[in-house]
Amino acid sequence: MENKESNPFYHRVAWKRAREEALRRDRYMCQDCMERFRAGYGIRPRRATMVHHIQPIEERPDLALRLDNLVSLCDECHNKRHPEKAGKKYGKKETEKPAKMRVIRV
């Protein structure tokens, strides 16, 4: 995984306010967990620790602070939405070991 410096956007007061507003709106509960729970499957919803941009800020910077583009998620669900950032568990596949060949002598 690359060692990136954090985006300065996430240190701005405007982002911190929008993030907190999204968490309050979602009652600090992971919305992906809630959706699965309401559908009758999945575990008890977890507490949200992340606020995710539905449309990435790199693609739509104009939506970066809009509440309708933000969703509260737990770490696990956020990692599922960003497998490239999550490491082995969700995104990167372990290298496959070659199948063992069995030699049959006749």
Image: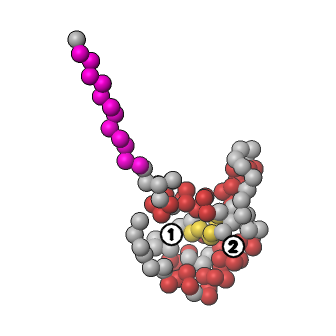
The kind of secondary structure the magenta stretch mainly shows is loop
Q: Residue furthest top?
A: 106
Q: Is residue 67 visible?
A: yes
Q: Can residue 68 be seen at all in this image of the molecule? A: no
Q: Residue furthest bottom?
A: 13
| Residue at image point 65% right, 79% down | 18
Of callouts 2 and 1, which one flags the residue occurring earlier in the amino acid sequence? 2
Question: In the image, what residue occupies the spot 50% across and 60% down?
Answer: 86
Residue 4 percent location from the top left of the image: 42, 75
Give the number of the disc on residue 56: 1
The numbered mark at residue 28 is none
The reply, left or right, for residue 14 in relation to residue 83 is right
Q: What's the residue at 55%, 56% (across, down)?
A: 80
* Residue, disc 2: 22
Label 2 secondary element: helix
- Residues rendered magenta in the picture: 94-105
Seen from the viewer's position, the closer of residues 10 and 47 is 47
Instruction: Identify the residue shown where x is 77% and y is 68%.
Output: 27
Disc 1 residue type (three-letter): Pro
